[in-house]
Amino acid sequence: MAEIKCTINNPQDGKSYTKVIETNPFLQKRIGDTVSGNALGYEEYELLITGGSDIAGFPMRPDVSGAGRKKIFSTKGIGLHLTRKGLKTRKTIVCNTMTTEIVQINLKVLKEGKPSLAEIFAPKEEKTEV
């Protein structure tokens, strides 16, 4: 199974943290679902799934139900950058349900526990002996 990169955004300090995990505890969850931080090893944390991307880099869209990729005809939204007003284009996106094809997940902290994420992800100081 592929590694999954979890990007955790903490709106209280405005920073993002990245954790790589081996197994996907978020299978069959959808964008907008809240999950416990225990899945990532963070006690007392509550996280909100805000998005992600699949193995080919296609972004997930919360407004398209189901699993897998779809081609949508859209004028605005995630994964779409139009240059002129009124243009519509067909775009490949990933639906809002987590599958084994998802390799990057965006999470937002709703409830913070102890220790804080800044303390967890603080760089470790190397000890040098003389």
Image: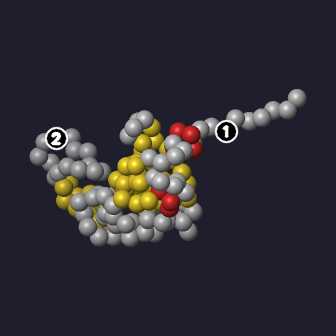
Q: Tell me which amino acid carries mark 2.
A: Arg
- Classify 10 Å Cα crowding around label 1: few (below 14), some (14-19), many (20 and above): few
Image x and y of residue 113, in percent? 48, 48
Rendered image quadrant of residue 61: bottom left
- Taking the spot 40% from the left edge, 49% from the top edge, the residue there is 111
Total marks placed: 2
Q: Observer-nearest residue: 13 or 52?
A: 13
Mark 2 sits on what residue? 84
Residue 38 bears which disc, if any?
none
Q: Observer-nearest residue: 12 or 104?
A: 12
Q: Tell me which amino acid carries mark 1.
A: Lys
Label 2 to label 1: alpha-carbon separation: 49 Å
Residue 80 visible within the image: yes
For residue 128, above or below residue 35: above
First-in-chain label (2 vs 1): 2
Please, what secondary structure does the residue beneath circle 1 have?
A: loop
- Taking the spot 56% from the left edge, 40% from the top edge, the residue there is 119
- Taking the spot 50% from the left edge, 61% from the top edge, the residue there is 39
Rendered image quadrant of residue 28: bottom left
Q: Observer-nearest residue: 53 or 128?
A: 128
Rendered image quadrant of residue 59: bottom left
Residue 124 bears which disc, if any?
1
Residue found at the very far top of the displayed protein: 130
